Image (cartoon, rainbow, N blue to C red):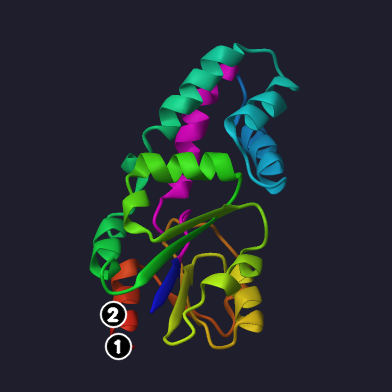
Amino acid sequence: MTIFVDFDHTLFNATLFKEKLYDVLSYTGFGKEEFFEIYNQVQSEDGWNDYKLIKALKSKKDFDENKALISLRALIQSTSDYLYLDAVSFLNLFQNKARLILVSWGDPNIQKDKVLNSGLMKYFDKTIFTSQKKYSLLADYLDKDSVNFFINDNPLENQEVAKIYPDMKILTIKREDGKEYQANDYENLKTLTDLQTISDVINKNL
C-alpha cells in the first residue's frame, strides 16, 4: 500500500503560518490586504520563497532587507509549531504499514526547509517537492500490487489526479481553517475533515 500525502493544509497549518508570516514582517509598514496581494502574486508564480517575497515587497516599499530575511528564516525554522495535532499520530500509525510519500507543491527549497524543520521528514519513504503539477509525478511511485491513496486538501488537484489515475483512492481533507475553494470544486470527491477520520477509511481497506 502506498499513501501519497500533501503537506500544506493537510499536515501543516499553512493558514496560521501565513498569518504569522505577516506578523513578523508587519514592521515593513504594509497593511494586511496589500501584503497578501503581493504574497499571493509571488505564490502564484511557482510558490513563494523568502528571497522572492522580500524582493516583491521591496519593489513597493523601502525597508531593512536583512532584518526581513532573518525574521523569515527564524519563522521557517519554527514550522514544528504549526503542525496539526493529528499529523504525527497519523504518520506514526502508517509508517510501518504503508509506503508513505510526501508530495508538496511550491518552491522546492522553501517546502523542503518547512518539512525538515517540522520534524516530519523521518516518517516518509520518499519526499517530492515540486512546482509542477502533482499528477505528473505520481506514476513512478504507484504500488502496482496494492492500493494507492492520495490525501490532499486541494480539490482541483484531486480532480486532476482522479482523471489520470481512476484506481487511485482520493481522500480530500477539508480543514476548518484550511484554504477555501468553491463548493462545486468538491463534486464527486470523498471529503473528510481530519486525519483521524481518514485513517479510519484507510484501515477499512486493509
**Region in magenta:** 5-28
Q: CA distance from mark 2 to mark 1?
A: 6 Å
Report the predominant secondary structure element of the magenta stretch: helix
Describe residue 68's horizontal placement relative to residue 76 as left or right: right
Amino acid type at mark 2: Asp
Dot 2 lies on which element? helix
Residue 94 picture location, percent across and down: 28, 70
Q: Which residue is mark 2?
A: 200
Residue 9 picture location, percent across and down: 46, 56
Describe residue 127's horizontal placement relative to residue 78 as left or right: right
Residue 135 picture location, percent across and down: 63, 69
* Label 1, residues with CA under 10 Å away: few <14, some 14-19, many ≥20: few
Q: Quadrant of residue 10?
A: bottom left
* Residue 8 within the segment the image draws in magenta: yes
Q: Which residue is mark 1?
A: 204
Q: Residue at x 38, y 79 (%)?
A: 1
Pointers 2 and 1 in contact (C-beta within 8 Å): yes
* Residue 82 within the segment the image draws in magenta: no
Residue at the right extreme, as displayed: 59
Q: Residue at x 64, y 45 (%)?
A: 47
Q: Residue at x 50, y 33 (%)?
A: 21
* Label 2, residues with CA under 10 Å away: few <14, some 14-19, many ≥20: few
Q: Evaluate whether residue 182 shows in this view.
A: no
Q: Which mark is residue 105?
A: none
- Split into 4 quadrants, where in the image is the C terminus? bottom left
Dot 1 lies on which element? helix
Residue 45 picture location, percent across and down: 72, 45
Amino acid type at mark 1: Lys
Against 42, is 171 above or below?
below
Q: Nearer the viewer, residue 180 or 46?
A: 46
Q: Residue at x 42, y 86 (%)?
A: 146
